[in-house]
Image (cartoon, rainbow, N blue to C red):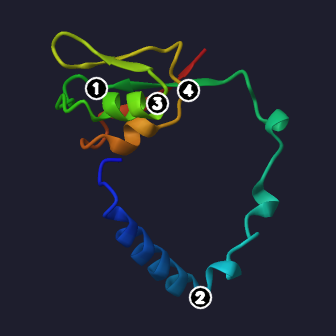
Amino acid sequence: MRYGFEMIDDLCDGLSNYMETKGFNSVNDMVGRSLNDIVKRYSLNGNIRIVSLFKKDLCVKDKLCYVSYRDGGHNAINIDEKGYPLIDEKECKGCVLCISVCLVPNCMKLKKLN
């Protein structure tokens, strides 16, 4: 979302480089390789809740976390009167989208709720 459609070329280049590095001749050589790592949803601990938080001293108030969450349909982040993110812990799903789009390293983190 941050880089636009031009990033498709970068993704294709990245996939080609990855395949060459790992010795794959085609995408079909990779199909099914992770099947042994898939687990049933009910085997996961559903009692653990993870939510986003941010470091105010690092935030540059560019609103990328807000825009990506809004456009992604979560509505877990709003902006306060000073331009800082307000994270609604009840709505946050711990999806790490905010961390993915944040320009500042270590500004957005996850915390485990009890």
Residue 10 locus on image (x, y percent): 36, 70
Mark 3 belongs to which amino acid? Leu
**Which of the labelled discs sits on residue 23, or is there none?**
2
Dot label at residue 93: 4
Amino acid type, label 2: Gly
Viewer-closest of 34 and 25 = 25
Q: Is residue 51 left or right of residue 80?
A: right
Q: Where does the image place residue 76, in percent across and percent down from the top left?
A: 44, 20
Q: How far apart are the two marked residues, 3 and 2, measured between alpha carbons?
A: 35 Å
Q: Amino acid at mark 1?
A: Lys
* Marks 4 and 2, the one that precedes in the sequence: 2
**Labels 2, 1: front one:** 2
User: Which residue has dot 3 on it?
Assistant: 110
Q: Which mark is residue 55?
A: 1
Residue at horizontal 39%, vertical 44%? Answer: 100
Q: Secondary structure at mark 4?
A: loop
Marked residue nearer the N-terminal end (3 or 2): 2
Given residues 22 and 72, the one toward you in this image is 72
